[in-house]
Each structure stands twice: as C-alpha cells, then as structure tokens.
Image: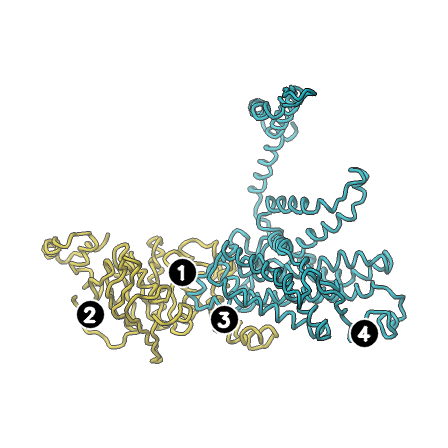
Amino acid sequence: MANVASTTASAGSELTARALREAVFAGLITLGLFVLFVGLKSDQNIRNELILTQRWGLLAIFVAVAMVGRFLIVVYVQPRFAKRKAAKAAAPDVVKKDTFFTRQWPKIAVVMLLLYPPVIVSLVGVQGSLKWVDNFGIQILIYVMLAWGLNIVVGLAGLLDLGYVAFYAVGAYSYALLSSYFGLSFWVLLPVAGLLAALWGIVLGFPVLRLRGDYLAIVTLAFGEIIRLVLINWTEVTKGTFGVSGIAKATLFGIKFDASKDGFAALFDLPLSSAYYKIFLFYLILALALLTAFVTIRLRRMPIGRAWEALREDEIACRSLGINTVTTKLTAFATGAMFGGFAGSFFAVRQGFVSPESFVFLESAVILAIVVLGGMGSLTGIAIAAVVMIGGTEILRELTFLKMIFGPAFTPELYRMLIFGLAMVTVMVWKPRGFVGSREPTAFLRQRRAVSGSFTKEGHG
Amino acid sequence: MAIGTEAMKKDPILKVERLSMRFGGLMAINDFSFEAERGEITALIGPNGAGKTTVFNCITGFYKPTMGMITLRQNSGDEFLLERLPDFEITKKAKVARTFQNIRMFSGLTVLENLLVAQHNKLMRASGYTILGLLGFPTYREASRESIELARHWLEKASLIERADDPAGDLPYGAQRRLEIARAMCTGPELLCLDEPAAGLNPRESLALNELLQEIRRDTGTSILLIEHDMSVVMEISDHVVVLEYGQKISDGTPDFVKNDPKVIAAYLGVEDEEVDEVIGEIEEIEGEHGGTRQ
C-alpha cells in the first residue's frame, strides 16, 4: 500500500476494513444480479426438453471479479484520485508560461503543413506519397475547413445546425453541374459555389429565425435531408443517385494536370503521375482552410463577430443593445454556409464525381462532432479534433497487423464508428468542453487572459 | 389624482399616454399615463406585481402594448413612437437603453467585450458593415480604438477598470449590476431605463449606485427612468416618482409628495379600499414622520 503509506497505520487498516466491507457488498450485489443470468442456464437437451444447466463456477468468477475489483478501487484507485484532487486544489493557480512554442505554434503548424508534401515525397517517393497526401492530408483538411465553417454557426453564434452538409452539397453540385453544363473553370465557380451556398444559408436562416435549441436543430436536420432528396429525385439535372461524373479538374494558372503536351508533367519534365495533381489539391485546400481561419479570426474582432458571440451568450441582452438579431443570425448562417460551399466545390474537383451518397446526415454529424470535440469556437481545438477523428479513422485502414491478432477475417475499418463513438464518449468525459474549452478574448485593456469554458454558454438557438 | 410637482415643466423626454397591456384575460396595465422629464431621474415604484416591469417592456419594445402611445422626444427634437418600433431599433434609433431585473450579462465575454458589444451599431458603420473592416481599412481601426476608450471611460465610472479583462460571469453580483449600467451607457442613450438596479445590493453598494446614477445624469444629461424597491435609492435620487398599483397609477409627484400620499401608504401597507380614510386619519396624526413608506 505504497500510496497510503503517508497516512497513519490505523487509517490504513480502517481503509482495508472498509474496502473489505464494500467488496463483500459488491459481491452480494453481483451474486444477486447474475445468479439467474449466469448461474443458471436454460437449455434444450437432445429430446427437446428444457433443462437447467448450473454454472456455479462461472458465477463464482463473476462475483470474485466484482469483489476484487471493488477492493482494489477502494484501496488504491480512490485514494490516488483524492490525493491528486487535493494536490490540484492546494497548488496555486499556475499561470501558464508563454513559451515560444505556445505563442508561435499556429505559424509553426502552417509551416509544417506547407512542408508536408515535399517531406512525404522525399520519404516514400512520388507514387507512395499519393496515399499520405490524398487520404490523410486532403481528407483531414477538408474536414478541418468544414468544421471551421460550421464553427461560425455553432461555436460562435450558438445556433445548432444539424444540416450543415447541405451547404457542402450545394457547393459540390454547383461546381459539378455548372462546369459540366457550361464548361466554366474551377476558379470562376469556386466563388460562385460559395455565394450559392451562402444564399441557401440565408434561405435556411429565414424560417428558423424564430426557433431555438432543439427545434432549430430539427429543422436544420430536415433542411439537410431536403437538399439531399432533391439531389436524388431531380434526375433530369442531377442524374439522381448515379451522380455527376467526369467533373473537370482544376488548373494551375491555366496549366492542366493531364497527359497533354502542355500539361503539368510535360511542362516541368516530370514523369506522368497523378501525385502532382494531388499535391496541388493539397495546397489548394490548405489555402482554402487558412482563408476560413483568417476570416474567422478577423470577424471575431469585428462588431459582427462580437455580436455572434453575444448572441450565443444572451439574445435578449443583444436586442436591448440595439443589435438586429435577425441579420446577425442570417450573416452567421450565410458565412458558415459559404465556407461549406467552398469546401463542397473543392470536394467535387478532387473526386471528379459527386453523388447524393456523399451528403448523408452522418457527414453533418461527423462535422458537428469535430466542432464539439474540439471545443466550440476554438480553431486550434477543432483542427486537433479533425486530425484525431478523421486521421484516426483513416489510420485504421493501415493497421493490418491487427489481422494477425484477430484473424484474417478482421477488417479494422468496420470498427470505425465503434471507435469513433468510444473516442467521443472518452473525450466528453475527460474534457466536457472539448479539447480547447477556453475562449480567447477579442480585445483587452491590459492583459489577454483566456476566458474559462465554465463561463461561456453553448447558445440556445 | 393629485399633482405634486410645484410646476410641471414643459419638456418631457418620454410621454406615455393611456398605455394598456393585456395578457389574455389579465389586464397588466390599465390606462396608464405619465411623463418623464428631460434630464431628470424618474422613479416608477409600486408593490410586487403592480406592472412596473411590464411598463418597461412596453417602453423598450419587448412587449407591444395593447393600447396607448409612447412618445420619445430626443434632445434634437426628433420624435419616435416607441410602440411602433422593433425592440432593437428603440435602442439603435430612439436611443433608449435598458437593464434587466435579473441581470443579463454576456458572461463568457470579458467585461471590456461586453462594453464593445454595446457599441455594435457605431462600429458596424465604421467597419463598412464588416466589409471594409475585413479588408483592414484604417477607419475601422480608428473607430475600434475610440470604442475601447469609451469603454475605458465607463469602466472607470463604474469602478470596474481593474476587472476589465475578466469574464463578466466572474464578477460579483454588485459589479455585474454596475457593468450592466455601464454597458447600457455605451450605447449612447438619451433615456436610460433601469429595472431594479439596487436589487440585491448591500447598503454600501447601493450608495455607490446612487452616486453613479447622479454622475450619469450630471455629466451626460441622460434622463433616467428607474424601477426600484429600495426606498433609500428612490427617495434619495429621484426627482419625480410615479406609483403604480394593479396596473394603474395611484400617485405621481415629488418624492416627498408621494411619500405622504395616503393612497401610496395604503398600497404599500396593504389596506383595503374602505379603510383608506381610516389610514389617512392615522397618517395625519403622525404627520411629520415618514418612515411609514418603508417596508
């Protein structure tokens, strides 16, 4: 009993006595619970008669596990937690030192992301980089961007939006359809897709202005489904469930990424590989994501951003200060939707194919989960959450060694959602406010001090 | 309905005429009229449930009155019919700011940010409705600096300057009350409506509140309309008191007049209508003392 050594011997024996008592009690409860479930088993014998199999040994194991477990918890685990809690309470509030790393780390992260493709190419070669740049880099960055876009609506303005994927779909289909019907280029259609998504954001915003909380969430959920169902059923235009394929690729200042004579590979004397296009796309989505972050940071320091956060805190107080909550909510919906639209058109150009399959409710839920896990309002936390959630599920595909443990029939990807759920529960228990629960103030007189998550509200509608 | 003010001045900032507010079958306010003079502190008092906050909500647009007219005349002479304006425009255009009975802070924002949110409309214009500000135009930076200076001014007045960078939810109760007043002042109001600003304050804090309110009136010329239960605040600082009971005005005049009005005393002591005359008799006996209005 090393950790109880500091307490007196009598307290130690008292603890053991209490632990024994509780262990016996736990054993009794287990016995009561499992005697019929485990101790007795009804079976059919060969003559189709119902017989009772008695499994007292198994029941004994159950009870023993419960008793030993309870004993160990009381003797070892609980004092340790209590001690840690006491130590935490006793320790003075340590002001976290601003090290170079904590101050500069967004810049460091951006530089690392910029260097990511060349490093990967030099490590695993041009062809080998495909997987790492595309499946990991681009995939994660799309979700980072989407979550940052949704963060404006949910994290800043406090409007729970369960249909965010609708704007992603609007952006994707805007590019897919306008480019295949009118042959417009990606660079023209990127802003168009953003604007169309923003427009739909306002369209969604109007009917839900009066709603709050759960009601708002349900209507946004319905809106997401409506968009998806329209895409499925408006077959003349969207080709329904078949989706739109053969979507034009993006170009770099007019240089195409194909096998033609003036294509990218030919122009720079490089061997023909789709990896270059993927690397180009990586930088494109990085730029788009950084644009989202830049605009969000800027907007937070502007009156509209402050009004969004004030709206999340208290809508009635906002109105009493002369803030038009209608336009404030609509701009939040429109701005968030616009970034969803940008991400959507990028998605279309990356896949070369869009179908309603990609815009199911699960996507909205994943994006929302990233925002909530990251810490509502915090760009850093959300980026971390996206890496963990999306990168984590991608990395499951790589864990082929698990087949050696669980047999060849084991496919780790199938456990994706299980692990996803488990991770969410764990994070929410461990950090109920997300990875970064505190909030950076947008203005200060003397010292910029983060606002603890216990003061901020989640918004109510 | 006796008029206690020696001579009614002729420049009311707020004129409430025949205001009625009905909630279903309940007549919360019934044919209520009063005027608030420019540059004065007008107090609205009355027993619990008399309809004071309802009057406030009608003035500030949170309720639309069933009947009646509420006219606000600004210093510039512009007139606004408040019952026709949406709530946020009453603050934005008519320049009426308010506080709430149960404090409504932006608790997750810092004290300074609370005051910056209050300057939303001014800053929106300066930032070219966000677009110019997003592009980094200097007009917004200039306006932003000025808004912080204004916030600093009010933080000093409300003696909250030490807590400027703390979350508003972290402030003690009394400080939150002062912050709410400072925040309302940051909207640049001509009429400040305070709903029980002294509720829950200790005597020292309520003294500080008196000083803050008198300073506001003296320095900015802002007219103040307040609901209050704390008679030490009402009698000390108000120039004019209106008493409301069961949605109707029962007295209107100077604090001294109201204090000795038998109807007011009856309302506060809870006397039946028939007994009012009796009470008046008793009052006349103890003429001179005025502790009777205190609860």
Return the residue at label 3.
B147
Looking at the colours in the rendered structure, which chain would you say is drawn in cyan? A
Pointer 3 with pointer 4, Cβ within 8 A: no
Return the residue at label 4.
A255
Chain bearing mark 1: B
Mark 3 → mark 2, Cα distance in angstroms: 40 Å
Mark 1 → mark 4, Cα distance in angstroms: 63 Å
In front here: A205 or B95? A205
How crowded pointer 4 is (Cα within 10 Å; few <14, some 14-19, many 20+) is rated as: few
Residue occupying the point 47% across, 55% down: B169
How far from the left and from the top, in percent, is residue A449?
A: 56, 58
Hey, what amino acid is under mark 3?
Ser
Return the residue at label 1.
B178
Chain bearing mark 4: A
How far from the left and from the top, in percent, is residue A112?
A: 75, 60
Residue occupying the point 60% across, 36% down: A81
SS type, badge 3: helix
SS type, badge 2: loop
Chain bearing mark 2: B
Hey, what amino acid is under mark 4?
Ile
Residue occupying the point 60% across, 28% down: A70
Looking at the colours in the rendered structure, which chain would you say is drawn in yellow? B
How crowded pointer 3 is (Cα within 10 Å; few <14, some 14-19, many 20+) is rated as: many
Q: Are marks 3 and 4 on the same chain?
A: no
Mark 1 → mark 3, Cα distance in angstroms: 19 Å
* Quadrant containing the N terminus of chain B in the rendered view: bottom left
Return the residue at label 2.
B5
Asked whether, in this view, residue A442 is left or right of residue A386, the answer is left
* Nearest-to-viewer mark from 4 and 2: 4
